[in-house]
Image (spheres, rainbow, N blue to C red):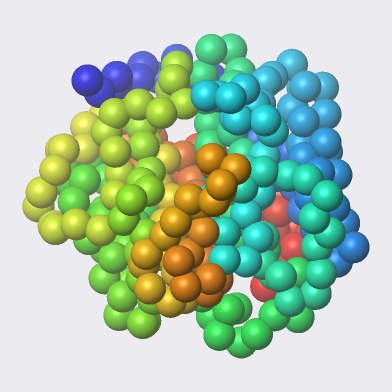
């Protein structure tokens, strides 16, 4: 069942998303070689707590951390620890905020120092595919229009889309209906209506689309161990517009690629 949001509920998600965006910005200031991933997690956790909100992910189905941190061939759901970032890495940082009863969710993948040209191209294409998908996330379209546009953009550039992991609705729950795949057919799926709030999140691999789960029970990595990138926004559908509720602007004030 899809839970459509009122304007008042979407306003709370906007406020949640603002805290989230600023938390991402604080983390971005510290993304560099030599930093341990657990230290990035601490920054996010403290910022969110200090702004009268909670981390959506921490404790969710037993997840141990505020941030999902996935480095290099890890696609999503990695968690922070003693790993020390080094030049040439890429790091996906996914975070959610729970505020006044509603969740927001966004992700960004960073290059650490100098990375290979082919990996940098992967990051740029994945980020661009997110906005290609958002362009199709408008009132009256079908969910398949969003999914197909992402898939086409990615595959036309020689990359692959992870199929086992998808975007999702969100609101009072972190994961709600509908699922938002990054592949599909135009004209298929749920019709996009006013009040729908969804997280669109392309997960794109440099190599094959195949993935495996690590023994920790959480981390998902590419089977061929080639790099994967992940970008995400929470968006709301209105009759006259689509609004991106989350923001990467605080990241991009301090971190450009």
**Residue 133 rendering spot, x and y as whole percentages:** 34, 57
- Can you say whether 49 is above or below 223 in the image? above
**Is residue 77 left or right of 148 when viewed as pictured?**
right
- Can you say whether 98 is above or below 110 in the image? above
Q: Is residue 120 visible?
A: yes
Choose between 19 and 88: the one closer to the eye: 88
Choose between 23 and 227: the one closer to the eye: 227
> How many numbered discs sit on the rendered protein?
0
- Looking at the image, the residue that sits furthest to the left is 187
Location of the N terminus (image quadrant)? top left
**Residue 4 rendering spot, x and y as whole percentages:** 29, 21
The residue sitting at 80% across, 74% down in the picture is: 87
Location of the C terminus (image quadrant)? bottom right
- Can you say whether 170 is above or below 129 in the image? above
- Looking at the image, the residue that sits furthest to the front is 215
**Residue 99 rendering spot, x and y as whole percentages:** 61, 18
Choose between 36 and 28: the one closer to the eye: 36
The residue sitting at 78% across, 45% down in the picture is: 81
**Is residue 240 left or right of 236 when viewed as pictured?**
left
**Is residue 116 left or right of 177 when viewed as pictured?**
right
**Residue 223 rendering spot, x and y as whole percentages:** 45, 66
Q: Is residue 19 visible?
A: no
Displayed quadrant of residue 73: bottom right
The residue sitting at 25% across, 23% down in the picture is: 2
- Looking at the image, the residue that sits furthest to the right is 34
């Amino acid at each position: 069942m899809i839970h459509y949001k009122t304007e008042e509920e979407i306003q709370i998600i906007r406020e949640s998303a603002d805290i989230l965006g600023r938390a991402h910005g604080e983390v971005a200031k510290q993304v560099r070689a030599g930093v341990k991933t657990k230290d990035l997690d601490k920054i996010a956790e403290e910022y969110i707590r200090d702004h009268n909100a909670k981390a959506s992910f921490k404790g969710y189905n037993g997840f141990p951390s505020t941030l999902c941190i996935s480095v290099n061939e890890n696609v999503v759901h990695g968690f922070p620890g003693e790993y020390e970032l080094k030049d040439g890495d890429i790091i996906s940082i996914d975070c959610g905020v729970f505020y006044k009863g509603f969740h927001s969710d966004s992700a960004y993948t960073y290059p650490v120092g100098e990375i290979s040209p082919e990996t940098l191209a992967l990051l740029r294409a994945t980020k661009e595919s997110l906005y290609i998908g958002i362009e199709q996330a408008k009132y009256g379209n079908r969910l398949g229009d969003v999914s197909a546009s992402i898939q086409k953009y990615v595959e036309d550039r020689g990359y692959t889309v992870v199929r086992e992991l998808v975007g999702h609705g969100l609101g009072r729950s972190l994961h709600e209906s509908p699922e938002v795949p990054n592949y599909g057919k135009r004209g298929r799926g749920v019709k996009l209506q006013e009040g729908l709030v969804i997280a669109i999140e392309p997960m794109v691999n440099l190599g094959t689309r195949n993935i495996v789960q690590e023994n920790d029970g959480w981390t998902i990595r590419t089977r061929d161990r080639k790099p994967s990138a992940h970008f995400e926004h929470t968006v709301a559908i209105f009759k006259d517009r689509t609004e991106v509720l989350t923001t990467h602007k605080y990241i991009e004030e301090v971190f450009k690629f």
